[in-house]
Amino acid sequence: MENDLERELIIRDYLARQRTTLANNRTLLSFIRTSLYFLVSGTALFEVKELDHVRDLGYLAFGLSFVFIIVGFMSYFRIRQKLKKGNYLKM
């Protein structure tokens, strides 16, 4: 009886780690998607010729796009490293 409970806990821990890994991948993809949205919106704002002050928003959108992609990859690799080491408590 105790062996079954111990195996079940091990399987639960394994599956929890797999869920966390998949959630980390999904979060990276959402950062990439958001970054691409800002990149596209920045490009669209550059194409507006009649309003000069909108061009500044295009620069801001490009900047935010790069910030999102960098933060996303940093977060992804940091959490992936913690998962490999087994440091689950300090996430």
Image: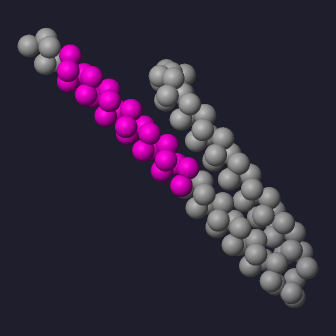
Q: Is residue 81 above or below residue 9?
A: below
On the image, the x and y values in percent for residue 11 come to 25, 28
Q: Is residue 31 left or right of residue 6?
A: right
Main secondary structure of the magenta stretch: helix
Q: Is residue 35 left or right of residue 7?
A: right
Which colouring convention does the figure follow? one colour
On the image, the x and y values in percent for residue 60 come to 81, 62
* Screen quadrant of the N terminus: top left
Segment colored magenta: 6-29
Residue furthest toward the top? 2
Residue depicted at x 49% and y 29%: 83
Residue depicted at x 65% and y 65%: 36
Q: Quadrant of residue 64?
A: bottom right
Q: Quadrant of residue 6?
A: top left
60 is within the stretch colored magenta = no
Residue furthest toward the left? 1
* Screen quadrant of the C terminus: top right
Residue depicted at x 58% and y 41%: 76
Residue furthest toward the right? 52
Total marks placed? 0
On the image, the x and y values in percent for residue 73 come to 64, 46
19 is within the stretch colored magenta = yes
On the image, the x and y values in percent for residue 70 come to 71, 48
Q: Is residue 66 above or below residue 45?
A: above
Residue furthest toward the front? 84
Foreground residue, 67 or 74? 74
Residue depicted at x 54% and y 27%: 82
